[in-house]
């Protein structure tokens, strides 16, 4: 049993998009700021084993929440398959192995919903996680993240290692990466719409057909689920983290067009990939085991994210 007031919690990737939300949620949950440890890549490069050894030695954590990742949208995955596989695989390998060596009380591994098979019955159930190959455009990244479930379960079997594996859907919210090359769907679309309005462009180009579906979860809600799981979830079987709501990319584009006020033409570039055809999680385990419900309605979260970017856009 973890003690909120005594655990020393290392949050890898704690300066990143999701990491900042998780750090704030830990504080709200009752963890003292002095017991939360966050470092940037310039201080510790987690792809280097010597840096992983050093961070464990310095922090002496009792709990590790591993959020750090090399990640991006479809285009970034196509450009960096080797880098994404290597970086995510080696970070996980070093962190779990040295968590074992250091007798960490609990290790929380964040997976990814894109690791589900390309064609999976909707909604995605945890039991279907291994029933096929991921969608090709993000398979190297997905398989690296997916392999960590095997490692955690193997370590549990051999060493009684206490690790949990969480599978979040696509996240969004203020503070996300709005880089057009590496950003995910929502921030990339918001930036395109806002730039088109600012530049007076009559149309914007969007990848794919718009028929693919996704499920989106506000990063604040995801952080709450992660912290709840850290302190309350026991077991080495994966658990989905999501809203359970599915939306097509075309429907998402319609919503963002209205929120941003873009009145031009949408041109669908059907020569570019859609990615996985459908993505929506079964969140019944999440709701049952952690009594979790989302707090932020999707339309409210989209408006927050658009407003955040508009404020930032003015100073770029």
Image (cartoon, rainbow, N blue to C red):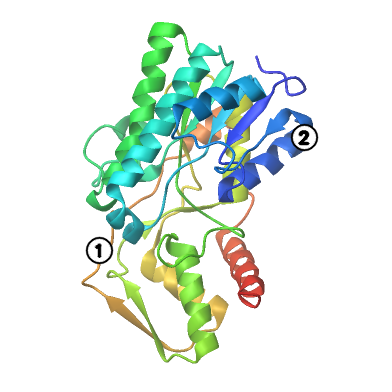
Q: Position of residue 234 (x, y in %)?
A: 53, 19
Asked if residue 121 can be seen in this view, the reply is no
In the picture, the disc for residue 138 is none
For the residues bearing labels 1 and 2, Cβ distance under 8 angstroms? no
Q: Tell whether 308 sits left or right of 143.
A: right
- Find residue 278 and report its image quarter: bottom left
Name the foreground residue: 306 vs 71.
71
**Circle 1 SS class:** loop
Q: Position of residue 68 (x, y in %)?
A: 50, 40
- Find residue 73 and report its image quarter: bottom left
- Find residue 5 and report its image quarter: top right
Location of mark 2 (residue): 33
Q: Earlier in the sequence, mark 1 or mark 2?
A: 2
| Above/below status of 255 relative to 61 | below
Label 1 neighbour load within 10 Å: few <14, some 14-19, many 20+: some
Label 2 neighbour load within 10 Å: few <14, some 14-19, many 20+: few
Which residue is at 36% across, 15% downward? 154
In the picture, the disc for residue 273 is 1
Q: Position of residue 304 (x, y in %)?
A: 64, 65
**Circle 2 SS class:** helix
Name the foreground residue: 24 vs 297.
24
Q: Position of residue 20 (x, y in %)?
A: 64, 46
| Above/below status of 126 relative to 311 | above
Which of labels 1 and 2 is toward the front?
A: 2
């Amino acid at each position: 049993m973890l003690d909120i007031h005594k655990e020393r919690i290392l949050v890898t990737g704690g300066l990143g998009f999701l990491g900042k939300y998780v750090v704030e949620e830990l504080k709200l949950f009752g963890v003292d700021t002095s017991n939360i440890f966050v470092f940037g890549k310039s201080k510790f490069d987690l792809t280097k084993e010597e840096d992983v050894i050093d961070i464990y030695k310095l922090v002496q954590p009792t709990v590790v929440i591993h959020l750090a990742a090399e990640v991006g949208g479809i285009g970034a995955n196509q450009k960096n398959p080797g880098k994404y596989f290597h970086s995510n695989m080696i970070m996980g390998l070093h962190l779990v192995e040295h968590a074992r060596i250091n007798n960490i009380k609990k290790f929380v591994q964040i997976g990814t919903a894109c690791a589900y098979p390309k064609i999976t019955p909707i909604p995605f159930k945890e039991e279907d996680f291994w029933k096929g190959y991921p969608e090709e455009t993000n398979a190297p990244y997905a398989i690296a993240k997916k392999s960590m479930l095997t490692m955690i379960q193997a370590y549990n079997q051999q060493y009684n290692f206490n690790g949990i594996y969480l599978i979040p859907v696509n996240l969004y919210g203020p503070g996300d990466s709005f880089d057009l090359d590496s950003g995910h769907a929502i921030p990339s679309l918001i930036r395109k719409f806002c730039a088109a309005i600012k530049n007076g462009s009559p149309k914007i180009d969007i990848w794919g057909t718009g028929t693919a579906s996704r499920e989106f979860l506000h990063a604040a809600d995801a952080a709450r689920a992660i912290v709840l799981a850290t302190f309350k979830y026991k077991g080495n079987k994966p658990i989905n983290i999501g809203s359970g709501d599915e939306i097509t990319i075309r429907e998402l584009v319609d919503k963002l067009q209205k929120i941003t006020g873009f009145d031009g033409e949408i041109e669908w570039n059907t020569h570019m990939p859609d990615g996985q055809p459908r993505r929506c999680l079964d969140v019944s385990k999440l709701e049952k085991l952690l009594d979790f419900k989302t707090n932020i309605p999707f339309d409210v979260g989209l408006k927050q994210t658009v407003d955040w970017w508009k404020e930032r856009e003015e100073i770029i």
